[in-house]
C-alpha cells in the first residue's frame, strides 16, 4: 500500500513541474541505474500519453521502472532472447500485472480516456487545467502506478539478490 509519505513526495514532484513519467521514475531514482538527468531526459516524451493521448505517462514510467529493476532481458538472436526466456517472462508478466491492475484501479490506461479528452488537441489542455483534471486524475494515476510497482518489486525481491525496494 502506498504510504502518505510517498503520496506527498509524488505530489511535490508534480508541483515542481515534473511530468507523470518523470515523477514515477524519480520516485524510484535511488534504485535505478540512471542519473537524475538521464531519467528526466528518457521520461520526458512520455507525458500526456506520448503527446497523443495514448498510454498514461505514469503507466509508461512504471513500465520503464520495471524494465530497469527486473532481470535484464537478453537481446539478439540467441536462445536467451527467446520469448520463453525467464527474464523476458518475468518482465512481461510484471508489465501485464501493472497494466491490468492499473486498468482495474483507474478504469483506463490511455491519458485521453483518463482525462476525458485529448489534452494535445485545440484548447483541451487549458480546459483540463480549468477543470482541475491534472490535480484530480494525475496524482491518483501516480499513486496507483507506484503502489503496483512497489508490490511487484517486493514480490520479486527474493529472486533479485541484493535488491531492496
Image: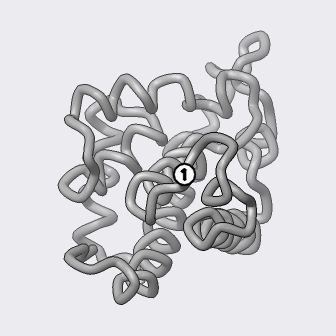
Q: At x 45% / y 32%, what residue is drawn? A: 43
Give how far across and how far down residue 82 sits, in percent: 72, 58
Q: Indicate the secondary structure of the residue bearing disc 1.
A: loop
Is residue 114 rendered to the left or right of residue 45? Answer: right
Give how far across and how far down residue 106 sits, in percent: 70, 64
Residue 48 seen in the current view: yes
Query: Vertically, is 38 above or below 10?
Result: above
Q: At x 62% / y 20%, what residue is drawn? A: 126
Figure quadrant of residue 38:
top left
Give how far across and how far down residue 97 sits, in percent: 67, 73
Q: At x 67% / y 58%, what residue is drawn? A: 79
Name the residue tied to disc 1.
Answer: 74
Figure quadrant of residue 129:
top right
In the rendered image, which quarter contains the C terminus? bottom left
Q: At x 44% / y 54%, what residue is drawn? A: 65
Q: Given the current orientation, which residue lies at the most extreme front position?
A: 78
Amino acid at each position: 500500500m502506498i504510504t502518505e509519505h510517498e503520496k506527498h513526495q509524488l505530489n511535490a514532484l508534480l508541483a515542481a513541474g515534473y511530468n507523470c513519467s518523470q515523477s514515477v521514475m524519480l520516485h524510484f531514482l535511488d534504485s535505478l541505474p540512471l542519473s537524475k538527468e538521464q531519467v528526466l531526459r528518457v521520461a520526458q516524451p512520455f507525458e500526456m500519453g506520448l503527446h497523443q493521448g495514448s498510454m498514461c505517462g505514469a503507466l509508461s514510467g512504471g513500465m520503464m521502472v520495471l524494465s530497469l529493476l527486473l532481470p535484464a532481458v537478453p537481446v539478439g538472436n540467441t536462445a536467451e532472447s527467446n520469448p520463453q526466456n525467464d527474464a523476458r517472462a518475468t518482465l512481461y508478466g510484471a508489465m501485464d500485472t501493472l497494466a491490468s491492475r492499473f486498468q482495474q484501479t483507474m478504469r483506463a490506461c490511455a491519458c485521453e480516456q483518463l482525462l476525458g479528452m485529448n489534452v494535445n488537441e485545440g484548447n483541451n489542455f487549458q480546459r483540463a487545467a480549468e477543470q482541475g483534471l491534472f490535480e484530480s486524475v494525475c496524482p491518483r494515476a501516480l499513486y496507483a502506478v507506484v503502489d503496483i510497482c512497489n508490490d511487484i518489486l517486493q514480490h520479486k525481491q527474493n529472486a533479485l539478490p541484493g535488491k531492496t525496494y
